[in-house]
Structures are given as structure tokens and as C-alpha cells.
């Protein structure tokens, strides 16, 4: 009989477990062993089995993970081919001679058989231990005080904090039964072993000891990585930024904030801190700290001055390291009242009367990313919100919190998908449904269906202009008559920078500017254009704050008919301008520039010009503004 111990002796521990768990037959191992003998270079049997395609990487990993507490670092490394049998034997000899009884892992590192980094990497990848950096984590000092620090030094670990499943503990060798026992003696059976570099553990123990003597240093210490990371986030909040960009470059770590839609430089840090800041942020959003080659995402909840900040983080692997972008969500107190979003009186009145106040139907706000469409949706919600109506949302994610409405943040990580949420939303007896974004035929169908059954639906779309939104909906496999009878309006939107009022000066449009606008000097009579000279208040940009530019398409009889007749976007546009008083984005921008709110540069930089604009006096009359 081939008993399992023989297999173990002959072919190693992993091989024997593979046989035991039925991944492979003994015959195949024997065959692989014969091949192994004939190879010119020495190769571990596991590698041979993999090359013969008898087993997969994944199966090896699963096997090791299942049995990880019975494994020894030394034999594992030999079997995986990271060190040789001779290396290991030599290490055992050294261990026997040394008085201090060093660990095998330590000796292998000292003998340059393997680097410490490789060691932790293998343990974390193969055995599934989380790799953490205690120096970058906030240690629960209460846990630390449960044993003398000598104890932590002896058993090479440091407790981090309490989690639901147990106490997270960083070990330099989570496979060492003595160390594990040492930790369990203090913290009980429920421990979650993680792996960390030995130096990081020792430094952490020393730091806490010092801190205990000189009283605990504050978390806001500028010199610590935690302090540095917090400072960046707080600075962004105080600056009123919407996004934080942390970018590794060859010679520095560049930090920029997006404010009013434009990136501004905040600070550079030496490239050495990049890794620590990245790791710290990954810890904050529970991303995988060992994974550096793949893109990742996460969410950070951060306490600042009594309010909880909510940030969405994205880690993007670049050639110089991971670029991190954090978007600040849930920024409260920034929801504008509907009459403050920047619509001119006549347009605003039509938007209210002919769209929002209608008992049912779909209202679509469209525009590219960063055009302010989400803010407009929130302004609409807050306009419609009252104790008499039930409002429910499906957002990805919730960006602002409004009291009195039921907001749901889509979370595909826990399988709370858009589709799943939309299936349930109509059963909640809502009056108004907010669908974060129409992104596919399914969500488009749900919006239209909900409107047909008497609901008011608010949603956003990702298109250049209002007619484009309509056309795209028509291309989404929904009958033209359903669209024409449910969609009540499409608003296209952009955000343009406002002229800084501190350094604004009158500006006379140059002939070239006029030409690019499609105007003659006569067309802009009565215009009072302005431009910022640049001052310290606007960081010498000449701009401060932003203003919304709108194009409101109401689906009246005429527009509906052109949809049913499947007219082209060009035709629908012409009809809307002629008979439905459509003001294009470009035209709305011109009126705002002529009133000194924004500049001609901004219009030409951001707004699509699909049609020659009408004269300023005509436009002013149409939007209901006098000069
Ligand atoms: Zn200024």
C-alpha cells in the first residue's frame, strides 16, 4: 500500500496533500518524478506537474491555503522552488549552532537565499495571508497594553485592531506555531493572522513604547504618513475641491486638486513617500495592499471636524506606480435651489411647468462627465421633495444626502446591482423615481415603463446635447411611440467657469472671436463682455466658481411628431429651434458671456456649435433677460 506518509517523504508535503484532496493521482506524480529525473536542470516536482498540465496554479494555491497551518516555511519554499534542499539544510545547521535560536525564514534571508520582500510576497500570495504594514496603521493601544512589549518582541507580532471576525494581528511568520500560540495566549482563539515585514513590526513596537513614555503623539503629526495623508484630504475639503489626484512621477509625487472643473497644483512630495501614502490609502479603503499591478477601487469614510466625509478612491496601475484619484462625495450644503442653478427666467418657468410639475413622465438631464448634471438632478429632487410625495433613488453612488428621500447606493461588490435595485424600486410605491444614469437598454426600459405606469422619473444620460439624448434613446430598442409619449423633456448641460469678480475688466470681442462665434459686430450689440485680469483670489486664472449652461428641449406636439416620423437629429433640431423656442447650449453661453458672467474663451472651449446662433437681442428676448 502506498500510504500517504511515503508520498510525503518521497515527493514532499504539497504533493501528498494534492493526492489526498483528489486533485491528482499517485501515478501521475510518479510519472512526473520520472520526468523530473531526466531533466537537465533541477525543477521542483510541483513545477513539473504544472508543466505537464496535471494541476493548475489555482489548485496548488487552494491546497496550500487549506492546509496552511500545517506547513513550514522552509519545506514550502523548497517545494515551490524558491530555494534548494541544500539551502534549507544549511539553514537548519546554522539554526542548530546559533544560541538565540533564529527562525528559518530569518536565516534564509541572512544567507541571501531569499529576500524578505519575496518571503512576505510568497506567504501572502500562496497562503492567502493579508500582507499589511503596521507602521501605516492606527494601532488599537488598548490591545497593545494587554501584554508587555517584550512579549510582542519575543513572539514577533503586534496586534492591530479588532474586526468582526476577530483580532487582526501582524506576524513576521504566521506559520510559526510558537508565535501563533504566543498571540493566542493573550488574545484568545479568535485571531486573524496577517503577514508583515519584521522591521515594520519592530519599528511599530518601538514607536508605541516611545509614545507611551512621552505621552501619545497626536494623530495629526505632519511627519507621520497617517498625518500626511489626512492633511492632503483635509486640504482638499477646505479648498472646496471635487477630486484629489495623487500621481507618481519619475522624480516626485505630484498632488493636484480639481476645483471648478480645472486641476490645480497643490503640492509635490519626494517620490519615496509614494508607496507609504498609497498603502495608507489602501488600508483606509480596504483595498488589497499587496496588489500593485492591477487597477483597484474602494471607498473611504473619513471623520473631519464632526462630519463624516465619503470618498471614492481609484488606484490605477501606471508605469511609475499607482495613480490615485479620490472623488469627494456626499458634500452637503451644496445642493442649489432650482432657481439658482443658472437657468434664465423663461427657461426655468418652462422647465418647472412643462416638465417637473407634470404628474408623470421621464425627465432626462444629459451631458458629459463633470457637466453638473448630477447636481441638477439633486436640485430637481429637492424642488419636488415634500411630505406628500415618496421619492426613491438608485444611484451609483449617492453623492449628496437629502433628508426625507430613500437613497440607495448601488454596490456591485455585494451584488447590489443596478438591475437588481430597479427590479425592486417600483414595488416601493414611489411617486418619483430617480435612476442615477441610463446606461443600457434595460435601465432605459425601466424608466419608460415606470413613466407609463404613472410615475415621475428623473434620470441622467451621457450625450453631447438634448437632441442627441433623444436619438440615443431611440437607438436603444425602445419603440418611438413609447418615447414620444413618456419623455417630457431633455435638458443638456455644461459648467463654464465664471469670471472672477475681483479682477474682472470689460472686454471687447476681437474680430477673430466674433468670427468664431459666427457673428458680425451688429449681432452682439448691447453685450457687456468681461474677462478676469488674474489676481491672488483666483490664483491668477481670471476665473472663480462655475455657472450652468442649459439647453432645454420640451417634447411638445411638434417635437413628438418628428420623433414618430423618425426625423434626423438635424431636422429635429431645426424644428425645435423654429417652433419650440429651443435655445442651444451655445446660445445660452453667449447670453451669459454677454452679461459678463463667463467668457467667450470658455464658450469656444466647451460648447458644441451645431448651428449659427441667433443675434444677442433675439436670444435675450427668448430667455427673458433684458440687457
Ligand atoms: Zn481674480
Image (spheres, rainbow, N blue to C red):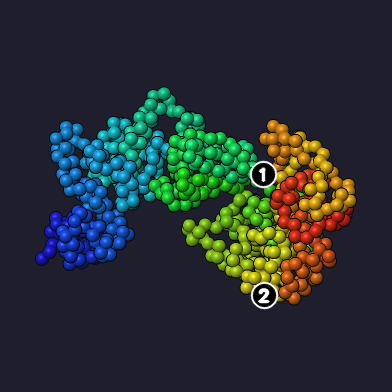
Q: Secondary structure at mark 1?
A: loop
Give the residue number, with chain letter if any, for mark 2: 479
Q: Is residue 404 visible?
A: no
Q: Residue at x 52, y 48 (%)?
A: 313
Q: Position of residue 106 (x, y in %)?
A: 25, 38
Instruction: Return the residue nearer the eye: 176 or 36.
Output: 36
Q: Which mark is residue 260?
A: 1
The N terminus is located in which quarter? bottom left
Could you classify mark 1 by the number of other residues whose Cα lies within 10 Å: few (under 14), some (14-19), or many (20 or more)?
many
- Residue 391 vertical position relative to residue 143 in the rendered view, above or below: below
Above-or-below relation of 287 to 434:
above
Name the residue located 33 percent from the left edge and 42 percent from the top edge.
117
Query: In front here: 37 or 414?
Result: 37
CA distance separating discs 2 and 1: 39 Å
Residue with the most extreme front position: 512
Residue 482 in view (yes/no)? yes
**Could you say where residue 350 lies in the image, as x and y percent from the top left?**
80, 59
Pick whichever of labels 2 and 1 is earlier in the sequence.
Answer: 1
**Residue 24 screen position, x and y as percent:** 23, 65
Q: In the image, 52: left or right of 508?
A: left
Mark 2 surroundings: few (<14), some (14-19) or many (≥20) residues within 10 A:
few
In contact (CB < 8 Å): disc 2 and disc 1 = no
Amino acid at each position: 500500500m502506498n500510504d500517504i506518509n511515503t508520498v510525503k517523504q518521497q515527493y514532499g508535503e504539497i504533493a501528498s496533500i494534492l493526492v489526498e484532496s483528489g486533485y491528482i493521482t499517485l501515478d501521475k506524480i510518479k510519472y512526473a518524478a520520472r520526468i523530473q529525473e531526466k531533466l537537465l536542470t533541477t525543477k521542483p516536482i510541483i513545477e513539473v506537474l504544472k508543466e505537464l498540465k496535471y494541476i493548475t496554479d489555482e489548485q496548488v494555491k487552494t491546497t496550500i491555503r487549506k492546509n496552511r497551518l500545517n506547513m513550514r516555511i522552509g519545506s514550502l519554499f523548497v517545494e515551490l522552488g524558491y530555494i534548494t534542499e541544500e539551502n534549507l539544510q544549511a539553514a537548519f545547521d546554522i539554526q542548530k549552532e546559533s544560541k538565540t535560536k533564529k527562525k528559518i525564514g530569518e536565516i534564509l534571508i541572512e544567507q541571501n537565499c531569499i529576500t524578505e520582500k519575496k518571503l512576505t510576497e510568497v506567504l501572502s500570495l500562496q497562503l492567502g495571508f493579508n500582507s499589511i504594514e503596521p507602521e501605516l496603521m492606527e494601532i488599537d493601544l488598548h490591545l497593545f497594553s494587554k501584554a508587555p512589549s517584550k512579549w510582542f518582541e519575543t513572539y514577533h507580532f503586534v496586534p492591530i485592531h479588532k474586526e468582526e471576525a476577530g483580532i487582526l494581528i501582524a506576524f513576521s511568520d504566521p506559520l510559526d506555531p510558537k508565535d501563533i500560540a504566543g498571540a493566542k495566549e493573550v488574545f484568545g482563539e479568535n485571531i486573524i493572522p496577517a503577514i508583515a515585514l519584521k522591521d515594520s513590526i519592530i519599528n511599530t513596537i518601538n514607536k508605541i513604547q516611545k509614545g507611551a513614555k512621552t505621552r501619545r503623539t497626536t494623530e495629526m503629526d505632519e511627519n507621520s504618513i497617517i498625518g500626511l495623508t489626512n492633511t492632503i484630504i483635509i486640504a482638499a475639503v477646505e479648498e472646496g475641491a471635487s477630486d484629489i489626484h495623487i500621481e507618481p512621477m519619475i522624480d516626485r509625487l505630484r498632488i493636484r486638486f480639481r476645483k471648478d472643473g480645472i486641476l490645480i497644483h497643490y503640492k509635490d512630495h519626494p517620490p519615496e513617500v509614494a508607496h507609504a501614502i498609497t498603502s495608507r490609502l489602501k488600508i483606509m479603503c480596504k483595498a488589497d495592499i499587496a496588489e500593485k499591478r492591477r487597477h483597484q477601487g474602494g471607498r473611504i469614510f473619513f471623520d473631519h471636524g464632526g462630519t463624516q466625509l465619503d470618498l471614492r478612491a481609484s488606484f490605477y496601475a501606471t508605469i511609475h506606480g499607482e495613480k490615485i484619484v479620490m472623488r469627494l462625495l456626499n458634500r452637503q450644503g451644496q445642493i442649489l435651489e432650482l432657481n439658482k442653478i443658472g437657468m434664465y427666467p423663461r427657461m426655468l418657468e418652462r422647465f418647472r411647468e412643462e416638465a417637473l410639475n407634470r404628474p408623470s413622465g421621464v425627465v432626462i438631464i444629459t451631458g458629459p462627465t463633470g457637466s453638473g448634471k448630477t447636481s441638477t438632478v439633486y436640485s430637481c429632487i429637492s424642488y419636488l421633495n415634500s411630505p406628500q410625495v415618496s421619492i426613491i433613488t438608485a444611484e451609483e453612488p449617492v453623492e449628496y444626502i437629502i433628508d426625507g428621500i430613500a437613497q440607495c447606493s448601488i454596490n456591485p461588490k455585494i451584488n447590489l446591482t443596478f438591475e437588481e435595485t430597479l427590479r425592486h424600486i417600483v414595488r416601493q410605491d414611489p411617486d418619483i423615481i430617480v435612476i442615477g444614469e441610463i446606461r443600457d437598454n434595460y435601465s432605459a426600459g425601466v424608466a419608460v415603463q415606470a413613466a407609463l405606469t404613472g410615475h415621475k422619473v428623473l434620470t441622467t444620460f451621457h450625450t453631447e446635447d438634448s437632441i442627441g439624448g433623444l436619438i440615443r434613446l431611440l437607438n436603444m430598442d425602445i419603440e418611438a411611440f413609447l418615447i414620444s409619449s413618456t419623455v417630457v423633456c431633455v435638458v443638456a448641460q455644461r459648467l463654464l467657469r465664471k469670471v472672477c469678480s475681483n479682477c474682472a475688466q470689460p472686454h471687447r470681442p476681437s474680430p477673430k472671436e466674433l468670427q468664431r462665434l459666427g457673428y458680425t459686430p451688429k449681432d452682439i450689440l448691447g453685450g457687456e463682455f468681461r474677462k478676469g485680469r488674474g489676481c491672488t483670489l483666483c490664483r491668477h486664472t481670471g476665473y472663480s466658481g462655475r455657472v450652468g449652461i442649459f439647453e432645454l428641449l420640451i417634447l411638445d406636439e411638434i417635437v413628438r411628431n418628428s420623433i414618430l416620423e423618425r426625423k434626423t437629429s438635424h431636422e429635429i433640431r431645426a424644428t425645435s429651434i423654429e417652433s419650440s423656442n429651443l435655445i442651444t447650449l451655445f446660445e445660452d453661453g453667449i447670453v451669459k458671456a454677454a452679461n459678463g458672467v463667463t467668457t467667450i474663451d470658455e464658450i469656444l472651449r466647451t460648447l458644441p456649435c451645431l448651428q449659427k446662433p441667433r443675434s444677442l437681442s433675439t436670444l435675450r428676448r427668448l430667455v427673458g433677460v433684458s440687457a
